[in-house]
Amino acid sequence: MKYLLLLFPFLLFSQNEIIEKVEADSLYREDQFYFGLTYNLMQDKPQSFAQNGLSSGVTIGFMRDMPINKERTWAIATGLGYSYNNIKHNIRVDAINNEYFYSIDNGFQKNNLVLHYVELPIELRWRNSTPISHKFWRVYTGFKFNYLFASQSKFISDTENIKIKNNSSLNKLVFGPYLAIGYNSINLYTYYGLVPVFKEQKIGNNDLNLRSFNIGFQFYIL
């Protein structure tokens, strides 16, 4: 009994410390930095179109988390980020007198299109986090706007080396919905572009309406 009496002040101190910590963290915010790795599965493909190798994507940015209920399990967030997409395909681009012509050509050693975007995401967030635990379930869904600030396409074969920078027939502004769902650090992520990568272009008689469909993983850091 006397040992319990000796321990009592320490137990009381620990309990007070926990209460003070919860009160101090009662205005906590979650997941204000993000990093994503994705694979780009192009949609609305023209006839004979094919992807070659891994069409990778990387996103990184900052989100301002703004809880909207007392428990801070619901929030809205907006932010600013950077998006990199490397699309490997069999579309050849030729530039003649400031006009662009597209065709399917499988006779290459390397053929890709690299896109650099500034992205503005806006999302609704649900999570079952607490002030003292950062391991929790989350479902974040939103809409993001991507502005293309740089691009480069390469077509390299045994006889040709074609490089085109900042192709003006690419859509500058693309946007679409996305979803991130998961537990703790690892979250499944998907994004679908509502706007085609290219403006009104054609390959033969087919419209070039390629749209991005990204699937992969999203990681969050406080």
Image: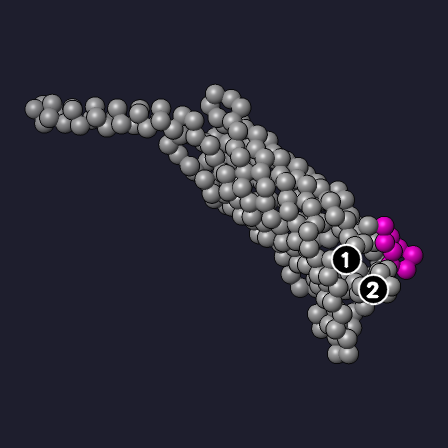
Q: Which residue is at 83% across, 53% downward?
A: 208
Residue on which the image places disc 1: 167
- Give x and y (percent) for residue 163: 74, 67
Q: Is residue 192 visible to us here?
A: no
Choose top left, top right, bottom left or bottom right for residue 190: top right
- Which residue corresponds to the image point at 77% horizontal and 75% vertical from the top-left? 160
> In the rendered structure, does residue 128 fall within the stretch colored magenta?
no
Q: Quadrant of residue 188?
A: top right
- Furthest toward the top, the residue is 70
Magenta segment = 200-207
Amino acid under disc 1: Asn
The residue under the point 39% across, 34% down is 133
Q: Position of residue 83 (x, y in %)?
A: 62, 50
Tag 2 secondary structure = strand
Q: Residue furthest front?
A: 97
On residue 95, the disc is 2
Q: Is residue 3 left or right of residue 190?
A: left
